[in-house]
Amino acid sequence: MIASPKGMASMEWEGSTVSEAPAAPDSLKQSGLSLNFLNELLLRTLYVHGTMLGLDMARSLCLPFKVIEESLKFLKDEKCIEVQGGDLIGRVSYRFTLTDLGRRRAQESMKQCGYVGPAPVPLDDYVEQTYRQAVTGISCSPEPLRAAFSHLVLREEMFNAIGPAIVSGRSVFIYGPSGNGKTSIARAIGEFMNNAGGEVYVPYAFLAENSIITVYDSSLHQRAGEGEADRMEDNEATIRRLMNSGTVDARWVKIKRPVVVTGGELNLDMLDLRYNADANFYQAPIQVKANGGVFLIDDFGRQLCSPKELLNRWILPLEDRHDFLTVASGKKFEVPFEQLIIFSTNLDPKDLVDDAFLRRIRHKVGINAPQRDIYEKIFNSMVKRLGMSPCPEAVDYLYERYYSKGRNARASDCRDLLEIVQAICRFRRQPVQLSRELIAEASASFICEF
């Protein structure tokens, strides 16, 4: 394991695997930020929030007070801020406010960059932490994986193909006719990684090429430990972090391994930095937000960008596990490409991509139409889930009427047909039940014959 230049705080949580947490910096130098950068961020913070206690400023920037104390003293000596009072426990309790000079400087700073929030971490720290919590480090064995897939009916050979793909952390190509569980399997992999893979740490933002790039996204990242007890512990941890040493760097958020899903809306712009022209900072692309977790590209081949365009964009990241991003100045910087990418498609892989692309996708899992024994297991599982009584005659009817006469059986037919039966019963205000007659009525409505 690579040693961090500022150390790592060891964290152990019962019942799960937690990546080593980044340790809070003891000084401005250890924070990886320059005095000038911190000065500007503090000025903008006071400009937006008004008068603040030293403790609240430290909390807003997610830095120990002793790290921002040097900057506060500098800004006071420069007559950019002033103290409006405080308690006897020291500068942490002082009330700081902007002077007229400080307000003018803050306004100028806002024009250059409007970012206000947790201080960013250095790019090098982000890279190190991301590789420490790589998907290849996830423990995966048959028993817990079977539990994650317990709601699905899989043949043993398919299950045995999925397990090694997860362990390798390499890309997976899932293909086959529509309606047979490709998306369900891909999402089950994501849920396994999310629940059994332990927690990881992502920064609110990192600093690269003098630009701020935000990473944490509450719409994609699920915080670990959101109960009332955890929030109380977080408050205590915040006080310790602001006053003491050896605590966790609060510029990082502990989350469950992310599961990012994209479909036909995917385009190449989503894979590049998103620039906020009004505030002059960036938002990380979705593959960066997926680092440490799963990135599912559903309905591959139907995106706004062609498979060939995606190949040209990702051919090196898939091989080398790192990517390059470009800021507005044209400067490039390297970031980890450290996620399990799953391509799911119902199109013929040979019609989508060439051998060069397929070679870089280590695992290919074909999912075909289910044989009757598997179909019956799926059907009966759905019957039980909907609270119906078993009816073997219903499956007999479907094979006699459709599947033995040219229509391919689909795993999704079980859910769709039985939900129609359920709707028919509810409409007629009769107990939800299953019969040959009801499945015939449902299939006549669902399976169109032109």
Image: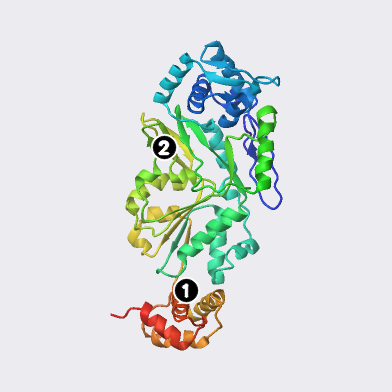
Where 187 falls versus 35 (above or below)?
A: below
Left or right side of 244 for 104: left
Residue under the point 40% across and 47% down: 315
Q: Amino acid at mark 2?
A: Leu
Which quarter of the picture shows residue 64?
top right
Q: Position of residue 231 (x, y in %)?
A: 65, 43
Nearest the viewer among 81 and 297 is: 81
Left or right side of 74 for 398: left
Asked if residue 167 shows in the view, the reply is: no
| Residue furthest left as drawn | 450
- The residue where tag 2 is placed is 325
Residue under the point 40% across and 78% down: 408
Left or right side of 48 for 71: right
Quarter in which the N terminus is drawn: top right
Nearest the viewer among 30 and 70 is: 70
Report the Cα–Cα distance between label 2 and label 1: 43 Å
How many residues crowd around disc 2 within 10 Å: few (fewer than 14), some, or many (20 or more)? Answer: some
Q: Position of residue 378 (x, y in %)?
A: 52, 75
- The residue where tag 1 is placed is 415
Q: Position of residue 6 (x, y in %)?
A: 63, 29
Where 266 falls versus 329 (above or below)?
A: below
